[in-house]
């Protein structure tokens, strides 16, 4: 089976170095918020050109803590995309606020800035653009809208570590940004993990309190917080992988160009496009087709894994039925849910494997 992502290859490639670092953690006797976490936070903040990086237990917690840290609460509205993983909207609901959806751009699949402004009300307090599949959202337009209406911007960068927008790193373009280190992410660990980046020192202080039960001094609590800390073991693994992330992302971009080269003439097949002012790092390589089921069946028969991202838009989820959205409200997003599917994309793919994937798609594409 050729997998969408091959974690065994990735971690076997780094196995010796990772085991050496894990041995150091074990020998240290310090397993929570120790030197490895401090080092990781420092290196992330330097790489993304922000003053602070605050590691947390996972990407969802990163979103929840950031929303709470910025004062988003019950009665507030947060505008975001209907075409994303559920955690984006779930985090808004978790702090008591209401997610308000705006349709996406048909080329980048990211939230369409022109649709954002239509959704702003007196209750709107924030915008959460998602850098979907590793392609940055249009942050210049989004930040302009936010400034005009006095809104905060939280980047959902969970799929986009290492991407850039107009030469600037994703993670440095809003009031804060949230990352996931889930194993399948471009920068991942052997379990859950997450981080928040910001250059707002006051927010960073609040987030550090929130992640440790609302305290910075043991047994003295300023806030009702959370238990959301990144373990030293995961920090050690992430430090090893952080040294490789630029090369891994470059390899993904190389594979993406190769897919485009050989699949560009397949009729009924839409390939992901990269905006001129952005660096797409292809967390997923999603292609669109009206023959999706036929093509996915052909891949499966050839022992090639594929997947649908995402099969049901957020506004159509049962849990958000009370928001009174209907089929047809966001036609672009709904079109994507019916046409997109992901094919294998990871830095440890081989040229022979990619040739085989391409050959099956060419055969099933129905030129």
Image (cartoon, rainbow, N blue to C red):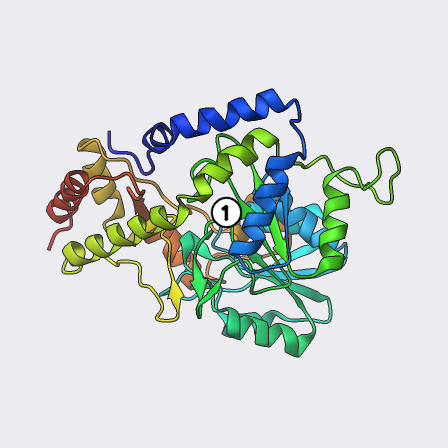
Query: Where does residue 44 sit, x and y in percent of width and height?
Result: 55, 50
Crowd class of label 1 (few under 14; some 14 to 19; many from 20; radius 10 Å): some
Residue 57 seen by the camera: no
- Give the mark count: 1
Q: Nearer the viewer, residue 293 or 44?
A: 44
Q: Nearer the viewer, residue 53 or 95?
A: 53
x and y percentages locating residue 305 in the rendered image:
28, 35
Q: Residue at x 58, y 53 (%)?
A: 45
Res. 269 image quadrant: bottom left
Query: Which quadrant of the figure contains the C terminus?
Result: bottom left
14 shown above or below 296: above
Is 63 situated left or right of 103 in this image? right
Q: Secondary structure at mark 1?
A: loop
Left or right of residue 332, residue 33 in this image: right
User: What residue sits right under mark 1 in the picture?
Assistant: 85
Residue at 39% across, 27% down: 15
- Asked if residue 68 lies left or right of residue 2, the reply is right
| Residue 62 drawn at (x, y percent) | 63, 46
Q: Which one is nearer the viewer's eye here, 214 or 105?
A: 214
| Above or below, comparing residue 287 to residue 169 in the picture | above
Q: Residue at x 20, y 53 (%)?
A: 258
Q: Is residue 189 visible?
A: yes
The spot of residue 267 in percent (x, y) is: 16, 59
Quarter of the image where the N terminus is located: top left
């Amino acid at each position: 089976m050729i997998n969408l992502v091959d974690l065994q290859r990735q971690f076997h490639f780094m196995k010796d170095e990772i085991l050496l670092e894990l041995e150091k953690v074990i020998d240290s006797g310090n397993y929570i918020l120790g030197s490895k976490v401090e080092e990781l936070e420092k290196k992330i903040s330097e790489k993304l050109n922000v003053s602070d990086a605050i590691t947390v237990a996972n990407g969802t917690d990163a979103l929840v803590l950031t929303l709470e840290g910025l004062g988003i609460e019950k009665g507030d509205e947060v505008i975001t995309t209907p075409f994303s993983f559920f955690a984006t909207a779930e985090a808004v609901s978790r702090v008591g606020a209401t997610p308000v959806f705006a349709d996406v751009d048909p080329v980048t699949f990211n939230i369409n800035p022109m649709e954002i402004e239509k959704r702003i009300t007196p209750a709107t307090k924030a915008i959460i653009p998602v850098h979907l599949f590793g392609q940055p959202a249009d942050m210049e337009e989004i930040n302009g809208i936010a400034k005009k209406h006095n809104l905060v911007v939280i980047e959902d960068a969970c799929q986009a570590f290492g991407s850039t927008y107009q030469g600037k790193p994703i993670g440095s373009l809003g009031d804060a940004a949230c990352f996931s280190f889930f194993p399948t992410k471009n920068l991942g660990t052997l379990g859950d993990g997450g981080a928040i980046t910001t250059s707002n020192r006051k927010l960073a202080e609040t987030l550090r309190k929130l992640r440790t039960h609302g305290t910075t001094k043991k047994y003295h609590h300023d806030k009702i917080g959370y238990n959301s800390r990144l373990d030293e073991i995961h920090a050690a693994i992430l430090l090893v992988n952080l040294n490789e992330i630029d090369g891994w992302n470059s390899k993904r971009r190389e594979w993406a160009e190769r897919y485009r080269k050989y699949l560009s003439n397949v009729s009924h097949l839409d390939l992901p496009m990269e905006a001129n002012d952005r660096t797409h790092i292809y967390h997923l390589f999603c292609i669109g087709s009206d023959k999706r089921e036929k093509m996915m069946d052909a891949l499966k028969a050839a022992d090639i894994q594929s997947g649908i991202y995402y099969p049901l838009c957020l506004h159509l989820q049962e849990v958000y039925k009370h928001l009174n959205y209907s089929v047809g409200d966001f036609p672009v997003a709904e079109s994507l849910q019916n046409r997109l599917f992901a094919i294998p994309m990871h830095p440890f793919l081989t040229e022979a494997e990619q040739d085989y994937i391409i050959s099956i798609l060419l055969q099933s594409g129905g030129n």
